[in-house]
Amino acid sequence: MQELVAVSGLVLIFGLSMWRKINMGAVALVVAFLLGVLYFGQTASGIASGFPGSLLITLLGVTYLFGMARANGTIDQIVGGAVGAVRGRVALVPWVFFILAAIITGSGALSAATNAILIPVGLAFAQRYRINPLLVGLCIINGTNAGGFSPIAVYYNIVDGVLDKVGISVDAGQLFLWTFIANVVINAVAFILLGGPELMRRGREEETADPTTSYLGGGTATITKTATWTGQKIVTVVLMASILVGALGFKLDVGFLALAAAVTLSALYPQHSKEALGHIGWNVILLIGGIVTYISMLETAGVIKELANSVAGIGTPLLAALMMLVVAGVVSAFASTNAMFVVLVPLAAPLLTTGSVGVLGFVIALCIAASAVDSSPFSTGGALVVANTEEEKREQTFRGMMIWGMSMIVAAPLLAWLLFVVI
């Protein structure tokens, strides 16, 4: 009965948030309080103790830092320079945006923030170079996923934090390597199917505008030149690089490093501080905090353990693993990928701790299955691609995103299961 109540709570959280467009985390906090106190007999303070403070500091720090980098023009500078470097080689434009998305997300930016920064820019360049907007949009989304599991990325920190709570650890380098390779392959398929060969035949074309033109204002007809490297931008890049050194070289906390960098920039250049605060991912912080608190409440009540044992007992371990991957793909296509990691990793604990399936292989497969479907037009990235496509191509792009996203729901979990769990 407890398991039924817990699953019903999850259905209510996902259903109500999607139906009424309410932040899923806010709904989860309310449901956690009501079920925890009224049904499971827990205290409000006990439920609140499940709120993941360290993870939220990471989200706060990196989104604040990238808010400063965006406000002071550093991100604009990097994007303009990278795209300008192709010098009319149209076949390279989609891959430049793939690499940019991977670098930005891999450096700690939220995937939603990366998409919000790059998709309007990418779609503007797609229009300029007469490239299929669906191709450029998918390159950005796939690039975001490629960088999403670096050791300092938000996706990785969420997965690693949840795994740590159930006493499991994975090789961060291997996880990043294989998820990156998987997304390169996915992107190569998209490139081939959506006009890449034709772009290669076109070769180099003359510029119709300055290659360093900035579209970070939203891809409108208003065009401004990218500014030169100022002292402020150089300081920003140095601070961002120092986070990589501190996190990877000295094992310092990414969240506090990013927060320190953001505060330093705000103190040195206060004129951008207010705008940067507006870029903090409060919605994502609330989302992750609420979902983790709900799952923590269920763990305290012993429900997660019972659910996990039930799932693990379905047929063979390999079949149970496949079912989890399919669920991850289906739900993540319509809801939060972050939330899927928080919910499904604890359910997989019995399979992983008993050795029924390989730990690293399953975690890699789960990361691929849950993130590859972010190209659905119902996800944030997919919706941004459709919204930023020029109006006469918008309906066609929506259909393309729908076909691609739905195909990923089937293909990504199955292929990831075969390659990383079975083999």
Image (spheres, rainbow, N blue to C red):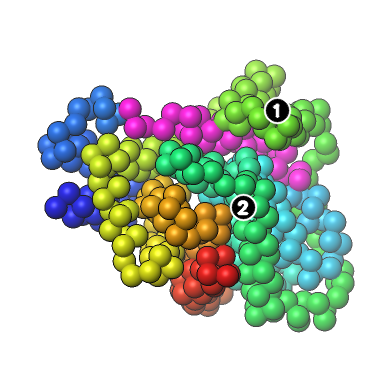
Is residue 85 covered in magenta? no
Q: Residue at x 62, y 40 (%)?
A: 152
* Residue 175, numbered label: 2
Q: Can the viewer see residue 222?
A: no
Residue 204, x across and y down, in percent:
87, 72
Q: Nearer the viewer, residue 309 or 419?
A: 309
Residue contact at pointers 1 and 2, CB within 8 angstroms: no
Is residue 65 covered in magenta? yes
Q: Residue at x 58, y 25 (%)?
A: 256
Q: Determine whether, in the image, residue 312 is placed left or right of residue 354.
A: left
Stretch of the chain drawn in magenta: 49-78
Q: Indicate the amino acid at tag 2.
A: Leu
Q: Can the viewer see residue 260?
A: yes
What is the quadrant of the C terminus in the image? bottom right
Residue 192, x across and y down, in percent:
69, 78
Disc 2 element: helix
Q: Is the residue marked by circle 2 packed among few (<14), some (14-19), or many (20+) residues within 10 Å? A: many
Residue 377, x across and y down, in percent:
47, 66
Q: Residue at x 49, y 73 (%)?
A: 414
* Residue 250, numbered label: 1
Label 1, label 2: how many angstroms apart (C-alpha)?
Answer: 20 Å
Q: How many labels, in total?
A: 2
Residue 357 drawn above or below residue 235: below
Dot 1 or dot 2: first in sequence order is 2
Q: Is the residue marked by circle 1 packed among few (<14), some (14-19), or many (20+) residues within 10 Å? A: few
- Image-quadrant location for residue 153: top right
Q: Determine whether, in the image, residue 265 is placed left or right of residue 303.
A: right
- Image-quadrant location for residue 51: top left
Q: Is most of the magenta stretch helix, strand or loop? A: helix
* Residue 351, numbered label: none
Q: Nearer the viewer, residue 4 or 112?
A: 4
